[in-house]
Image (tube, rainbow, N blue to C red):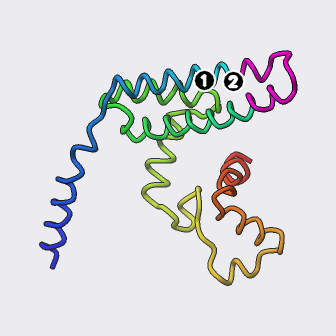
C-alpha cells in the first residue's frame, strides 16, 4: 500500500517538476516593479492632490504592501529565486515597509508555524477553537471569528490577531 502511494507521489513530482523552475531575472524584475509601484503610490498618497486621488493611491499602496509581504514570505521559504543569498536580500528589503524583521520572522514562521501548524498551543498564527471553546466565547468574539473566515475577513485577521 505504501509503495503505491510513493509511486503516485513520485509521478506527481515528475509532472510538477517543470513548474518548479525558478526564473531569477523575472523574480528580481517583479520585486523591482512592486517596489516602484509601492513608492509611486505612497508619494501620490502623501501629495497635495484631491482627497480621492490620495485615497486611491493609499489603498493601492496598502495592497502593494501585501504583495511585498508575499514576496518576502516566498523568499523566506527559499522559493522566490534559486539563490539563497538573493532570497535573503529580497526578503529583507520587501519586509522593510511593514517593519517586519526577516530573521525573526523566518525563525518563527518556518520553524514554528510550519512545524506545528494549527496545533495548540504551539502555533501562534492560527489554532482552531473546539466547539466548546467557540460556544464559550462572547457573542462579539464569535462574530469576529466568523468574519475572519470570510475571504474579506482574512485581511482583518493578520493586523488584529498578529500585529495587535
In the image, 138 versus 29, the foreground residue is 29
Horizontal placement of 58 versus 102: left or right? Answer: right
For numbered disc 1, what is the local secondary structure?
A: helix
Q: From the image, give the main secondary structure of the stretch colored magenta.
A: helix
Q: Which mark is residue 148?
A: none
Residue 42 image point, x, y percent: 71, 23
For numbered disc 2, what is the local secondary structure?
A: helix
Residue 66 image point, x, y percent: 60, 39
Residue beneath disc 1: 37
Figure quadrant of the N terminus: bottom left
Q: Residue at x 80, y 20 (%)?
A: 46
Position of 19 relative to 50 (above/below)? below
Badge 2 density bin: few <14, some 14–19, many ≥20, Cα 10 Å: many
Horizontal placement of 164 versus 31: left or right? Answer: right
What residue span does the magenta drawing correspond to? 41-57
Q: Residue at x 30, y 34 (%)?
A: 22
Q: Which mark is residue 41?
A: 2
Q: Hey, which quadrant is residue 144 in on the image?
A: bottom right
Residue located farthest toward the top when viewing the structure as drawn: 48
* Count of marks placed on residues: 2
Position of 109 relative to 37 (above/below)? below
Asked whether 117 falls inside the magenta stretch, the response is no
Q: Residue at x 78, y 70 (%)?
A: 143
Horizontal placement of 39 versus 74: left or right? Answer: right
Badge 1 density bin: few <14, some 14–19, many ≥20, Cα 10 Å: some
Q: Residue at x 73, y 35 (%)?
A: 59
Amino acid at each position: 500500500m505504501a509503495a503505491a502511494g510513493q509511486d503516485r507521489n513520485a509521478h506527481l513530482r515528475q509532472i510538477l517538476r517543470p513548474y518548479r523552475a525558478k526564473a531569477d531575472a523575472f523574480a528580481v524584475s517583479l520585486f523591482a516593479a512592486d517596489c516602484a509601484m509601492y513608492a509611486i503610490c505612497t508619494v501620490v498618497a502623501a501629495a497635495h492632490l484631491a482627497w480621492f486621488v490620495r485615497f486611491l493611491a493609499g489603498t493601492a499602496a496598502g495592497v502593494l504592501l501585501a504583495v511585498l509581504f508575499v514576496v518576502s514570505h516566498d523568499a523566506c521559504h527559499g522559493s522566490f529565486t534559486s539563490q539563497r543569498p538573493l532570497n535573503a536580500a529580497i526578503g529583507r528589503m520587501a519586509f522593510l515597509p511593514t517593519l517586519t524583521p526577516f530573521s525573526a520572522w523566518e525563525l518563527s514562521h518556518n520553524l514554528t508555524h510550519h512545524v506545528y501548524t494549527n496545533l495548540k498551543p504551539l502555533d501562534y498564527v492560527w489554532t482552531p477553537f473546539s466547539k466548546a471553546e467557540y460556544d464559550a466565547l462572547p457573542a462579539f468574539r464569535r462574530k469576529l471569528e466568523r468574519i475572519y473566515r470570510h475571504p474579506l475577513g482574512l485581511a482583518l485577521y493578520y493586523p488584529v490577531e498578529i500585529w495587535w
